[in-house]
Amino acid sequence: MAAPGRPGFPTGFVAVFLVTCLLFAITAATVADSRSSDAAGNAMSDAFAAMFAGALWIAVSVLLVMAAVGGAMVFWAPWTLFGLVPAALVAFFLAMGRFGEGDKSAMIVVIALPLLLILYAAWARFPALHGVLQPARTSAVLLSLVGVLSIGAIAVDWRAHVPTPQSRADYQESEQIRMEEAAKVDRREREREAAAFARLGPDSRLADYLPYLRDRAFADRALEGMQKVKTRQEDAVELLNRRPLADLTELWQWNVLATREVCEAYGNAFLAAANRITRARSDYLSAAMDLEWQMPNLKWILGSKCDLSGPLERAETNIEAVADSDRLRNFAITLGELKTVR
């Protein structure tokens, strides 16, 4: 037997009912429109749909509680809803996911589940709507529909995502094909790089060899080739003027003479690198550590009587100002000692 409803016009229930209906309409429209744009637009639609869906199910839950408290539900309906609503919620979001994957039939679940519960809450809250319908039978029919839809949606999603022997075989085959294609692409790229490297020679520029210094397959041969480049003196000056010093850590191995032009270009590049060591930059510590890689270059160029006292002093001062470890403090001391090398 249904519990008697409370007298008076249920203003609060009507207000929540209208808000719930509005959220239902917005959610259904957003989900239906979530596959009509490009990838970025669809992702944004999915985010909005999930947000509206969450608000919708909160409103549906509140509506059902208000219907149970102030309406005329049969005695077993609240307990049934206690287990049914979470299942419906899970089924709803699984159906949203399937719709996003291209299953258009999942939209039936997205619309039907919240709609059935909204209608049931309204029917239960207003006993006058019962008419000749028996509350127990009507509750059983409506809530059974919700249960069948929920279980069916969950079962369909589970079957769709549980791999069958055939699907596992298909996946393994597709993975093997993908790996073979990736290997072919990698092999073609290596062949292209090898062919480009084979075209280099004494008439090439140092800049042409630079990318190969970071590749183990070419590093040794690239260094040998750089040592034979005819224009290596001019190229070294140009690289020092144009490239970050961190890209030129092997300069000392390029068979370049530390001429006045090379010394001047290296000093300017070193000073520019030292000026990056300031707390005004977020990467000041990595900039300081980058200079540590210049020690072989420094020993080579200072051994050729280049005067780097100014750049070394700037680097020492800047590193001391930001040093947060013994490693950097000791490095600053080392740079101070190098200033005296003649």
Image (tube, grey):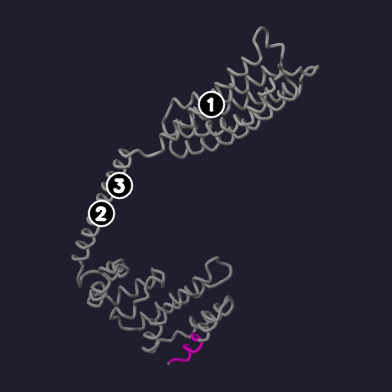
- Amino acid beneath label 1: Ala
Residue pictured at 31% horizontal, 83% vertical: 257
Quadrant for the N terminus in the image: top right
**Residue 275 image position (x, y, % from top left):** 51, 73
- Amino acid beneath label 3: Glu
Q: Is mark 1 in CB contact (under 8 Å) with mark 2? A: no
Q: Quadrant of residue 165?
A: top left
**Residue 132 image position (x, y, % from top left):** 66, 7
Q: Up-down: is 266 above or below 243?
A: below
Quadrant for the C terminus in the image: bottom left
Spatial CA distance of label 3 from label 1 is 37 Å
Spatial CA distance of label 2 from label 3 is 12 Å
Q: Which residue is mark 1?
A: 29
Q: Nearer the viewer, mark 3 or mark 1?
A: 3
Q: Which residue is mark 3?
A: 175
- Amino acid beneath label 2: Ala
Q: Nearer the viewer, mark 2 or mark 3?
A: 3
Q: Which residue is mark 2?
A: 183
Instruction: Tell me which segment is drawn in magenta.
Output: 334-341
